Image (cartoon, grey):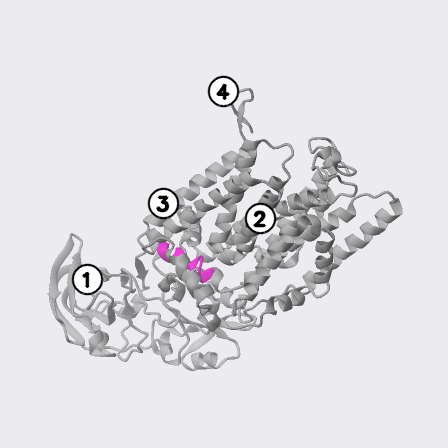
Amino acid sequence: MSKRGVNIALASIFLIGLVLRLLALRFEPAHHPDEYFQYLEPAWGRLTGVSIETWEWRSGVRSWVLPGYHGAWMAVLMRLGVHDGSTIGKILQAHWALLSMSLVWAGWRGGVLLARRLAPGRVEDGTAASLGEGAKDETDRTAPAGWQGGLVGAFLCATFPLQVRFSVHTLSEHVSILCLVCALVLTAELVRTSGRTGREQRKRAALVGLLLGLGICLRIQHASVPLVAVLWLLVARRFMPALVACAASVLPMLLFGLVDRLTWGSFFASFIAYVKFNLVEEGASIFGIQPWKWYWMEFHHRLPIGLPILGLLCLLGIRRNWPFVASALGLVALLSTQAHKEERFVMLFWPLVLIAAAAGAGGWLMPRRHRLRTWFVRSVILAALGIVLVDGARHCQGNDFTDLDSARYEGQIWAGTQDDMTGLLFDLSLYTGGYMWFSRSFPQLEFQTNLLGNPLFSHVLVLRNSRAKREAEAAGFTVVFSKDEMVVLRRNTRTRPTEPRDP
Amino acid sequence: MVLEDVQPHERRPRRIKVWMLGLAVLGGLWLFGLVSFVAADGHFEVVLPRTRTPPPEFHNFSQWDLGPTIRASSFHADFGYHHHPAFLVDGRATPDIVEKWMSAEPDRHPWIEITWREKHHLERVVIRHAGSVESGAMTVHDYTVRCLTDDGQGPSVQVLSNEAAVASHDLHCAQARGIRIEFVPNDSKDVVRVYEVETWGR
């Protein structure tokens, strides 16, 4: 294929990825309450003075870096006249969805680099001239060697359903994934040194270090990737880039430490508190304990047919994609030692495995001596990849929190827009969008029958067939909004209780 | 669009590409937002809608349905124990323990302000402290009640060693716009809990 043809195919993949992320933005429900209460709500509270404060923020186990990043954008949007919290939230989700397109680039670049090194008939010196058929210099009119793996990697990263779903969530895992996957791909470029001067290498190594440092600060549990990246550089005898990368990775750590000093009073205060609570004391166990093999059961649940296919493709290219496979397996091994497990913790597994599998597939998609065999192998590989995507699409629905109902969020947003709103009672406070989605400063509390007597509470958001709804109706509320299983009831103004007092 | 800045000692002209320019603009915007975010003081304010016309006689003009504005230095905003400042004016005679204002733990200088839509002749301020519903030990002892006028701060009452669960303070203030109460927590780790603030006058 010509370079132009590959570019057109790549542009089409980017477009498909973008469209899928737009669809996710429209239809994807909340994945986890933390995406609001840990990373958006604190920033909203600082700007508006009203927010739900979770125990993590009272105990100081969260860093202000990510809420600060969101908060800066919120402040800009408010200056531009956008004051509706749910709109700001959607814009921030769209921004992360756009940034997640960097994974498509990572899929392309990683696929090209790894598949190129798996090309049939390749000699080990790593120069362009020694590569297999079609492996000419990238400035030429022919496509870059390994483009098959690149296109497969880009396509998988653009369309893998679980990854598309996850791309719109404002979770620290997502940001860390973007940093670490791109860093690992850039490490692959450092390992392949042909055509790079020492200065360019050092610049690239510094970028790798910054991304690795940022990724690990955002999510310490993702430590397997930085470890493997440095190991990879050492094994490839790239000692100077390894040194530069390690030195550069200290900078984000210092930034996080400094932010902790300014916000929590001492350097690395939130980091130490987080590690102590989650990793040392296993405090997260109070949120549930799962067996060690839980993550593998989850992978099997998400990809019952496709997982062995991905595994086989990874094995086919294990000579070159081992750092990606080792990072993914290291992540699962590390997380499996923790008693409390959630699917979002392990989402980094998927892009690593997809890129590794793309390299394996790309190596087999390259032309071989026998034309018939070439086309047969290509058909099998493409069919296998098709099965992976279809299987992924069939099993991508649902998440750890079954009570996360998008209708509840919509009901809360609707209630917040009402002129006569002075207070909201809802059934499950954890599964709402806090004060940001509400966009009003009036009180919001979990439903209690006696609170119906407080005249401030003008609206109630509960399940359609619930005791709370019946009690609200008995207290003079009537249904004014309904969506799926959720209803919003409004107090009849004539039934507002008044309790006059003498001075 | 390509802007070229030719350097005499360089072989190739340095190019500023559109995407670089776009990134620089976004970075500048973000930094501006960051400064605004850091500078925000995060104090609370809510304006309640008016649903009742104020009576001409002696009355509590901080009642929620007369549409007061409430400001607070902070509030305790847990999921379950959500002690919102609007509860200060809800007029509940027998409130639940959740229906009170409680300052946030890190707030060492808690204050509240209640302002009204019109000027009033203030005569008395009644504060229903924690002791009116919970343990008397939770009642805050030291605080200052100030009258707010268009010219700034009017007369004030300084309260020391208060033990009353429902404290009534005479505070005569003509042309009053509102009141501000500045509390001193009972000890360095304590918070302030108040169920209701009433401002009586005409």
Q: Main secondary structure of the magenta part?
A: helix
Residue A9 in the image: above or below residue B167: above
Q: Which residue is mark 1?
A: B182
Magenta residues, start to end: A36-47
Q: Which residue is mark 3?
A: B35
Q: Amino acid at mark 3?
A: Val
Q: Which residue is mark 2?
A: A231
At 73% from the left and 31% from the top, the residue drawn is A141
Instruction: Confirm whether circles 3 and 2 share one chain.
Output: no
Residue A179 in the image: above or below residue B108: above
Q: Which residue is mark 4?
A: B7
Query: Mark 2 Cα within 10 Å, few/some/many (few <14, many 20+)?
Result: some
Percent position (x, y) of residue B106? Answer: 29, 61
Q: Is residue A40 magenta?
A: yes
At 30% from the left and 53% from the top, the residue drawn is B41
**Of labels 1 and 2, the one closer to you:** 2
Q: Amino acid at mark 2?
A: Leu
- The subunit carrying tag 2 is A
Percent position (x, y) of residue A412? Answer: 46, 66
Contact between labelled residues 2 and 3, with CB atoms less than 8 Å apart: no
Whole-number angstrom distance, CA of label 1 to CA of label 2: 59 Å
Q: Check disc 4 and report its element: helix, strand or loop.
A: loop
Q: Is A286 situated left or right of B57 in this image?
A: right
Contact between labelled residues 4 and 1, with CB atoms less than 8 Å apart: no
Whole-number angstrom distance, CA of label 1 to CA of label 4: 62 Å
- The subunit carrying tag 1 is B
